[in-house]
Amino acid sequence: MRTFRSIANTALLVAAVATTAFGSYMPAIAGKAEPQGLRWKDRVIKIAVSNSVVDQNTNIKTDSDVIGAIRRSLAAWERVSDVRIEFELSDRLNVSPSGANGDGVSLITIAQTPENLLLFSKDPQAESAKTRVFYNRRNFITEADIVLNPFQQFSTDGTFGTFDLESTLTHEIGHLLGLRHSAVLGATMSGSLPKNGTFGLADLSARSLAESDIAAIRELYGAGAETDGCCAAFVGKLNSGSPKPAKGVTVWAEETGTGRVSAISELQADGSFRLGGLPAGTYSVFWQKEDDLSPSPLSVLGTYRVAKDETRSVNERINFTRSELGVNFVGINGQLSDTAVSLTSGREYTIFLGGKNLDHRKLEIEFNSPYITLSPNTIAPQDFGTGISVVSLVVKVHEDTPAGVYSIFVTGEDGAIHSLIGALNIQ
């Protein structure tokens, strides 16, 4: 059986999609575009947890460790940034309605009230949660409400067919803190979250923050006084020579020594970008343009070393080209999805790639890491029906592979390179 799902993007609604999706970021004022760099002014943030979440209810599996999941999801962000989140239980049930101002209380709820159910009325099965963010004219967040989808099922023990509660909360807390979705497939802030049972596995990897998640939160709040060697940044402008605003261009950095994805950013309309929150080190910096359903070929901006507190400027002229090759999905166990696959070090795996015009005889598949290698002569065609081109390959994850997310690079007959950013999540 083949399964693959695409991410549902919404403006500022933070949603975790039922089949494979996380939270979508939702503006408090409907139809208003979200500004960049939203964050809280104070480093101590107070939230309320509705008793509808902690009391026994039909949406959360009996005997689930709800309070533990809440505490761990908050701690995941507190450990890596200069921010603290305090919570208390509350009898409140409703998310604040859309508009210029909320009720002043940041709430986590799952209550089946009309206001909460309305958020999921268009497609009750499409998302696992949403976060509504309120902010002032200075782009400081004043309130953020998280609603777990009352139409979905959650657990904390990996029960198949449910969403992992801790993974969902960790993602939504990232939105509450001001983070958007990430194009890194294996990041906690990825737009896709697999249900337990996707690929036939219980995947709890989103409980742990990826390097790109850590860089993103440190870019907003700093790393904290106890963190050494942070933080560096890459800034610059990519000029395509076109008068039109740059759209759909992703810039990301990978550790040169390991190949782990370290930070990612979208190119702004004027061509500018910033990759901040990075530890001192050496990085390879890439860009890639998303074009409809298939990404255009990527390019390497260069390899650079940055020191603590250094901001490195990278300005380049770039050219957009078209390629007949496209890579959109990755999978394992005979299935495809738009979420990363989780692997364990010291093992071999058969991986599937899906897209268009993937000719096994003309592909070169590589990893920007010495720890992941392609077994020779293992790229083979697979029949997943019409409308999608699929190949399989055997990869070896070495025993000493550092935990993190790694990209897959695919080169076609025309020499154009495409990447699935952070498609392999090594545990």
Image: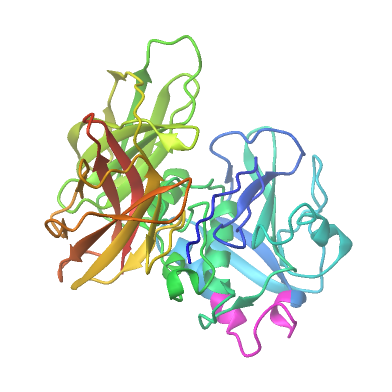
| 300 in relation to 114, above or below | above
Q: Is residue 151 above or below residue 372?
A: below
Q: Nearer the viewer, residue 425 or 414?
A: 414
Instruction: For residue 215, say whether it is visible.
Output: no
Q: Main secondary structure of the magenta part?
A: loop
Q: Nearer the viewer, residue 345 or 46?
A: 345
The part of the chain drawn in magenta is: 53-70
Q: Which residue is more in the foreground, 417 or 249?
A: 417
Residue drawn at the location 60% of the way across and 55% of the way down: 23
Residue at horizontal 64 percent and vertical 43 percent from the top: 10
Residue 114 percent across, percent down from the top left: 88, 61
Tell me: residue 319, above or below residue 149: above
Above or below, 374 relative to 233: below
Give residue 295's position: percent from left, percent from top. Answer: 40, 35
**In this orientation, which residue lies closer to the viewer: 337 or 346?**
337
Can residue 217 be seen here? The reply is yes
Residue drawn at x 18%, y 58% is 378
In the displayed structure, does residue 423 sit left or right of residue 123? left
* Quarter occupied by residue 152: bottom right
- Residue reaching furthest right? 114
Quadrant of the frame with the C terminus: bottom left
- As for residue 54 lying within the magenta part, the answer is yes
Report the residue that reaches farthest toward the bottom: 63
User: Residue 292's x, y, as percent?
Assistant: 50, 33
Q: Estimate the x, y position of residue 75 in percent, counting from the top left.
A: 48, 69
Magenta segment includes 4: no
- Quadrant housing residue 322: top left
Taking the image as shown, residue 26 lies to the left or right of residue 413, namely right
